[in-house]
Image: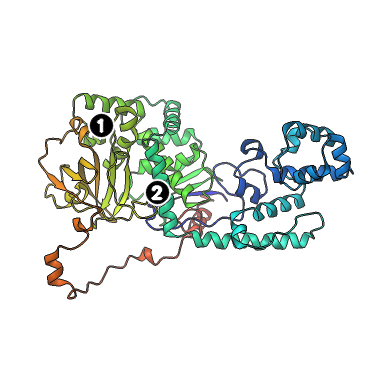
Amino acid sequence: MRIFTYSQEMPRSTSSAPARTQPPAGWGRPTEQPAAVVRRTGTTAPEAGVDVIALGRRVRHLRKAAGLTLDDLGAAVGAAASQLSLIENGKREPKLSLLQQLAGALGVGVDALLGAEPPSRRAALEIELERYQRSPLYENLNLPKIRVSSRLPLDVLESQLGLLRELERKMNEQVATPEEARRANGELRRMMRERGNYFPEYEAEAQKVLAQVGYTSGPLSQHTISDIATHLGFTLYHVGDLPHSTRSVTDLKNRRIYLTHNQRSDHDPRSVLLQALGHYVLGHETPRSYGDFLAQRVATNYFAAALLLPEKATVEFLQRAKAAKEISVEDLRDSFAVSYETAAHRFTNLATQHLGLTTHFQKTHQSGIIYKAYENDGVNFPMDHTGAIEGQPSCKAWTSRAVFDVPDKFSSYSQYTDTVTGTFWCTARTERSASGEFSLSIGVPYQHVKWFRGRETTARAVSRCPDPDCCRRPPMELSDHWAGYAWPSARAHSHLLAAMPPGAFPGVDETEVYSFLEAHSGA
């Protein structure tokens, strides 16, 4: 059974999934290649360039099948036997002219030599072992290499591969740490910054889907979203026993999407469904790493937002607001009937590409810890050595922290903040969820504030972070009075002690999901 599970919330300190030993499952059927070939190359030779190891084994197989020695083949193509030996051992890539001569001498087409399918099971095993022995993993072991030849007994070949596969799995478990997750998140954010958080490929897919169901304008209704699901071939089921670690489950065998009928969810049910459909529309396969998992999350969140706030209509709305110098996230939220967080995210997608505005966004817990962040305007977000912002404490002087102390929770709070990288204007508001109270803030450099409503605020603060004397180190008078006389008992967060998630979808209990699908498959 092939499934896609969508985790309830982005894990704050979970791990990368260990490498799977079976071919990856996903929205499309796995390619019919040996699992190890798919895992290491990620594509077939014609797309990724000549796979010299596979090519060499194919040449050797065809040569022996034709009853030719290296000298015989060399004489036929005008090449030295030593040169052909290097090719067969995957240590040299032949020129196109020699490749054509080899194909002719062996009675096959060039495509046959470059094919993705190994000529035999043994050849597939030899290719896999050769790849392992050339990988960084094997190099770091500083072990002698086994000469992969026809004289190597099959049982030795299989035994060696079994050991290397298990070693790779163990090594992947070791690197599946919170640090690896934060590093992957930092790399993804750098890519988003370079693109201005704008992805035209996802915009195009969203527009295509909207056109196919006849959407014209206005907020995306539940009825229209149901039409989208039907058009894509899925049936929707609202259930009361959705696995606790998920917010939707897609059964690809029976083309069903299961959603909760609990109306108290922190998430817009429209977004949850559209994100689930996004995995299908965007052709996602089972993530092979935490980086893949996060990238897919960004893609489906973007896809869902591009459906809820279509690019053309949203840009026109924002351009009118800019012309009137009245850009407001609240107005964007109300016009398209979405959450404030969705409207803020969508603004970051379109602000740089269509309005020429650099910006930043953050979602901060009432404890001061940053849960989500994006910037391309030079704001000095705190980050660790991996480049990760999530999990870091936001400066107490910033708007994202100051808003928690504002009595008026109905209106947005705006503030200017002088930082070490310049002055920024930010607008923020707070929202409650099952995980506590959060602030959601959008900010821009001082030169862009003239386009926004709320620029007239007189609230101003100074942040000297990352200087620890700004807000992380207690004031001297307090330290002198209490240092050595305070012993707080820290609140333990259970997720810090939890075992690393074992599956491809961090935070999801796959046994629970499979049991759920089995129970509902006959419904």
Asked if one can make out residue 501 in the rendered structure from this viewpoint, the answer is yes
Q: Quadrant of residue 414?
A: top left
Asked if one can make out residue 242 in the rendered structure from this viewpoint, the answer is no
Is the residue under label 1 in contact with that under label 2 (CB below 8 Å)? no
Say the numbered circle drawn on residue 159.
none
Q: Which residue matches tag 2?
A: 186
**Image location (x, y in percent) of residue 28:** 57, 41
Please report the residue visible at 63 percent of the width from the left and 43 percent of the height from the top: 31
Question: Tell me, what colour scheme is on the image?
Answer: rainbow
Mark 2–mark 1 Cα distance, whole angstroms, equals 33 Å
Q: Secondary structure under badge 2?
A: helix
**Image location (x, y in percent) of residue 116:** 69, 41
Q: Which residue matches tag 1?
A: 335
Question: Can you say whether 300 is above or below 5 in the image?
Answer: above
Q: How many marks?
A: 2
Q: Is residue 302 left or right of residue 424?
A: right
Comparing 227 with 449, the one in front is: 449
**Image location (x, y in percent) of residue 90:** 72, 46
User: What kind of residue is marked 1?
Assistant: Ser
Local packing at callout 2 (Cα closer than 10 Å; few below 14, some 14-19, many 20+) is: many
Q: Is residue 502 left or right of residue 192?
A: right
Please report the residue visible at 17 percent of the width from the left and 50 percent of the height from the top: 402
Question: Can you say whether 499 is above or below 313 in the image?
Answer: below
Q: Quadrant of residue 141?
A: bottom right
2 or 1: mark nearer the eye: 2
Q: Secondary structure under badge 1?
A: helix
Question: Can you say whether 361 is above or below 147 in the image?
Answer: above
Q: Is residue 234 left or right of residue 101?
A: left
**Image location (x, y in percent) of residue 318:** 26, 28
Please tell me which of labels 2 and 1 falls first in the chain.
2
Q: Quadrant of residue 490?
A: bottom left
User: What kind of residue is marked 2?
Assistant: Gly
